[in-house]
Image (cartoon, rainbow, N blue to C red):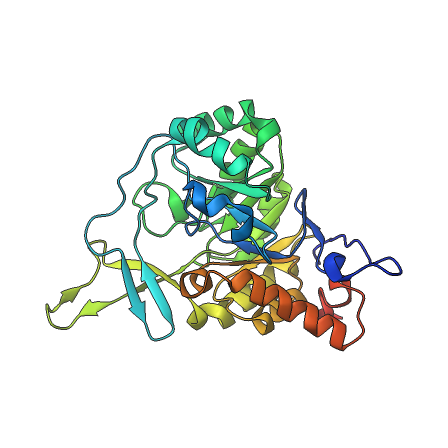
Amino acid sequence: MARYFLQRRSPGMGSDNMLRVSCGGIDLASPILVASGVWPFEKDFWLKERFPGLGGICTKAVTSHGREGNRGTRVWETPGGMLNSIGLQNRGVEHFLERDLPVISDGGIPFIVNVAMENPDETSEVLKKLEIMRDKIPAVELNISCPNVSDGGMAWGKCARSSAQAVSMARKKWSGPLWVKLTPQAEDIGEVSRVAQDEGADALVVGNTWLGMAIDTDKCSPVFERVFAGLSGPAIFPLALRMVWEACSSVSIPVIGCGGVTSAKDCLAMLMAGATAVEIGTAMFLDLQSGKKLSSGLEEYLLARGLDGLNDIIGKARR
């Protein structure tokens, strides 16, 4: 079961503290985080008024060198969510440190830098450069789960052996809080979770998008040039919830539930399954106020039942 910490309300204190948690080395005012790949680096998105209800933001992926991303169609709507094939488009770690980090550091909200696992040498260099700025970076999220690239990505997270290699390397290069984002394509999510913990992960994000595809019936061809793409949105929520349950059954470090969360009820289910926090992605494309609405829903649930805070519901379905 994931360990967690909650600052309880003192007599006369308002509800601001009801949702506060400590997760993987970071104190969060809310358990609602934005998943990686969603939030832009533009300054306008890092103003305080953008963050109501949010506890933190996972950045877009950072790689050793800039990537243009995948060609052709990148996003395709489905009845229960969307498929995406972005391909880790970014300008590289040097640009991130020089241009993006100063902007997001002034945002006044905890952020987690998503580092895409490439090959060990390249990712090692990225982490060494981030380590130099350790005092400005709250945490790193090692992404061993991206389904939309040919080199690295989810190949590292499919089995326990390669997952252990990736996390071990990252732990040696990065001294701060280390989150590891797992893939639902893992052969055994429980085993991968355990080895990530054993190799030094401080928290696990469970998980990334599921592999899917779409066919353009007018063109009689796959929509995406890579054929397969990552499926997110409400359709995958029951699958993600099952993975969170299995991961929480296997480790003692915090687990962050990620996949199809679009309502306060979804958040509650993730927390009751043992998650310490949740990440939302597709929900933010639908409504930038999702963080506020979900956090308000959690507070209403706690208040209606006379509960002190999240410690009264985290893992409750397992008791």
| Residue 12 vs residue 247, the one in the foreground | 12
Residue 21 in view of the camera: yes
Q: Residue at x 50, y 24 (%)?
A: 128
Could you say where residue 28 lies in the image, as x and y percent from the top left? Answer: 66, 49
Query: Split into 4 quadrants, where in the image is the N terminus?
Result: bottom right
| Tally of marks | 0
Give the left or right position of residue 107, taking residue 157 as reference: right
Above or below, 81 relative to 200: below
**Left or right of 277 in this view: 214:** left
Foreground: 32 or 174?
32
Residue at (39% x, 35% y) in the render:
63
The residue furthest left is 219
Identify whether 271 is placed above or below 255: below
- Identify the image quadrant of the C terminus: bottom right
Foreground residue among 63 and 108: 108
Q: Residue 297 in the image: state x and y as whole percent.
A: 63, 71
Residue at (38% x, 30% y) in the render: 64
In percent of width and height, residue 23 lies at 67, 49
The residue sitting at the right extreme is 11
Residue 312 place in picture, x, y as percent: 77, 67
Q: Please identify the quarter of the rendering in which residue 75 is found.
A: bottom left
- Asked whether 270 or 9 is in front, the reply is 9
Residue 174, by quadrant, is top right
**Position of 75 relative to 218 (above/below):** above
- Toward the top, the furthest residue is 132
Relative to 180, is 224 on the left or the right? Answer: left
